Image (cartoon, rainbow, N blue to C red):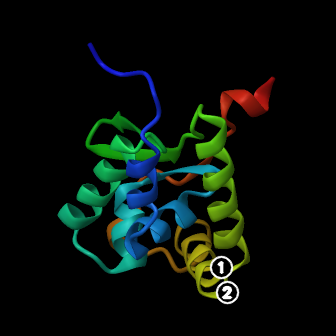
Amino acid sequence: MKSTTFDIELLLRALADRTRLRLLNLMGGREVCVCFFVEILKTSQPKISRHLAYLRRAGIVSSRRDGKWMHYRIVEPADSTAKRVFDDVRSWLRADGAMARERERLEGICCGTRTPSKLLQAPQPIPFTPVSKRL
């Protein structure tokens, strides 16, 4: 039987990697296709996918397949202590200058005039409102 307790150690290990922090930063409050992560982070798709799988195991990211495209979004931890830690990290990400530049780059690539040709057919990042925020 699977444990229902939140693994805070796994969360902290997930947050202890710069690439995973960059992925969380880019997701913010939206659902993002892997292809955009690859373009912004200039990292291979398998490496990005491994990091996203780690975040999924930590319980802070969920995924959705749409044909050949994989989309990822942030999921807030149900555990109140984990949620506080996660919210603090996300606040720091929003305030960090380098992270802000990466978010601006994502905006320029997906929603501006600088979309690379290989991403023209890719699904655009979409705003995502967690269930807890919709109520």
Residue pushed farthest left? 46
Residue 22, image x and y in percent? 48, 71
Quarter of the N terminus within the rendering: top left
In the picture, measured across the screen, residue 32 lies left or right of residue 82, that is: left
Q: Which residue is mark 2?
A: 97
In the picture, measured across the screen, residue 29 lies left or right of residue 60, that is: right
Residue 87, image x and y in percent? 68, 54
Foreground: 19 or 11? 11
Q: Which residue is mark 1?
A: 100
Residue pushed farthest right? 135
Say which quarter of the image contains residue 47: bottom left
Name the residue at 43% across, 21% down.
4
Residue 126, image x and y in percent? 59, 48
Name the kind of residue labelled 2 in the image.
Gly
Q: In the rendered structure, are the residues bearing label 2 and label 1 in contact, judged by CB atoms less than 8 Å apart?
A: yes
Name the residue at 59% across, 76% down.
108
Foreground: 2 or 125? 2
Disc 2 crowd, CA 10 A, few/some/many (<14, 14-19, 20+): few
50 is higher (above) or lower (below) than 59: below
Name the residue at 33% across, 80% down.
42
Name the kind of residue labelled 1 in the image.
Ala
Look at the image and tell me whether residue 24 can be seen: yes
